[in-house]
Amino acid sequence: MSAPAPQTSPILSVSGLRFRYPGAQTDALAEVDLELAAGEFVAVVGANGSGKSTLARLLGGLERPTAAREAVACGHDLLTEPGRLSARQDVGVLFQDPENQLVAQCVEEDIAFGLENLAWPSGRIRERVDEMLARFGLGDLRRREPHLLSGGQKQRTALAGVLAVPRRILVLDEPTAMLDPAGRREVLAAVRELHGEGLTVVYVTQEMDEVTDADRVVALEHGTRTYTGGVRDLFGDHDLVRRLGLGLPAAGELALALAERRVELVGPPLTLDELVAALEGVA
């Protein structure tokens, strides 16, 4: 008889998580439970005001929970100040506006900023900055001033700066919200590659086309977790999608429009490739 598989502890675990902003009458987050396995890609969705960005900041150790039964990220207790400070080294957070994270005079100095604050030796900093410049296709821009970059270049620079410090979890708070289609593709490609290499990803978004790569979706509604499960199961529940104000990926919206014309597809298709394949099956 074979031995049972070893149980792996979650890399992040929060239970009964609550947060209320000073002066507010209600909680921004109430009794939220969430566990992440190492290497998992979890998308967090919900309407404006549902608590997505608040959750992102709490997971990154940037805010103190009002209360929780448990709140641990990479072994660090998010309920304590020392734990939150330690978590910030293991959990990187990328915000939607890269301008908020670009603080230096040029790209390479920006990438080096966090390493300098951690007092890395200068030789190691140079090596790591060169690695990040190459990794994110920024080598030709190393001396470029941030305000001269395109939106996608700015966000890639901010991402390179976040990941210059080795991380175990990457939390992205609507990272493509301010980007044009080209910049959005650049950032999504970088995130897919990072996840493919084993980085744990928490991806906050209101763009449903960006959810389709996730292993799992968590939906928030008025500060509570309303849904956690597979991407396809979420988008297959049209009543829940409407209630949460989410919409469908573009392929799913097209499939619904076709259904109104009595073209029934097996699905729902989540990507344009799936839609094309489904239409070929109908033909």
Image: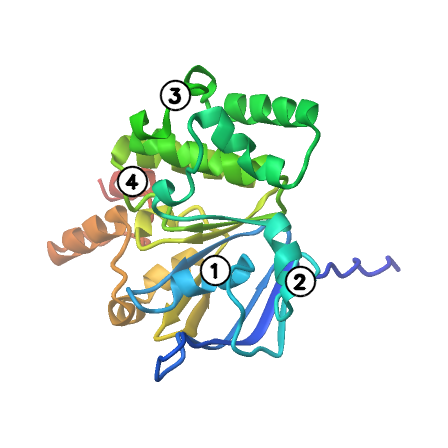
Q: Is residue 213 above or below residue 238?
A: above
Identify residue type, mark 3.
Answer: Arg
Q: Are marks 3 and 1 in contact (CB under 8 Å)?
A: no
- Residue 25 location, quadrant: bottom left
Report x, y in % for residue 70. 63, 74
Dot 1: element: helix
Side of 49 where 107 appears, left or right:
right
Identify residue type, mark 1.
Answer: Arg
What number is the disc on residue 105? none
Task: Determine the CA span between mark 4 and mark 1.
Answer: 33 Å
Q: Nearer the viewer, residue 208 or 127?
A: 127
Q: Is residue 113 above or below residue 107?
A: below
Task: Determine the CA span between mark 4 and mark 2.
Answer: 43 Å
Q: Nearer the viewer, residue 166 or 35?
A: 166
Q: Is residue 186 above or below residue 98?
A: above
Say which residue label 1 marks: 57
Q: Residue furthest top?
A: 140
Q: Nearer the viewer, mark 4 or mark 1?
A: 1
Residue at (62%, 79%) from the top-left corner? Answer: 69
Say which residue label 3 marks: 144
Task: Determine the CA span between mark 4 and mark 3.
Answer: 37 Å
Side of 76 where 44 appears, left or right:
left
The crowd level at tag 3 (other Cα within 10 Å; few <14, some 14-19, many 20+) is some
Q: Nearer the viewer, mark 3 or mark 1?
A: 3
Say which residue label 2 marks: 83
What number is the disc on residue 272? 4
The crowd level at tag 4 (other Cα within 10 Å; few <14, some 14-19, many 20+) is some
Q: Nearer the viewer, mark 4 or mark 2?
A: 2
- Residue 147 location, quadrant: top left
Task: Determine the CA span between mark 1 and mark 2.
Answer: 14 Å
Identify residue type, mark 2.
Answer: Gly
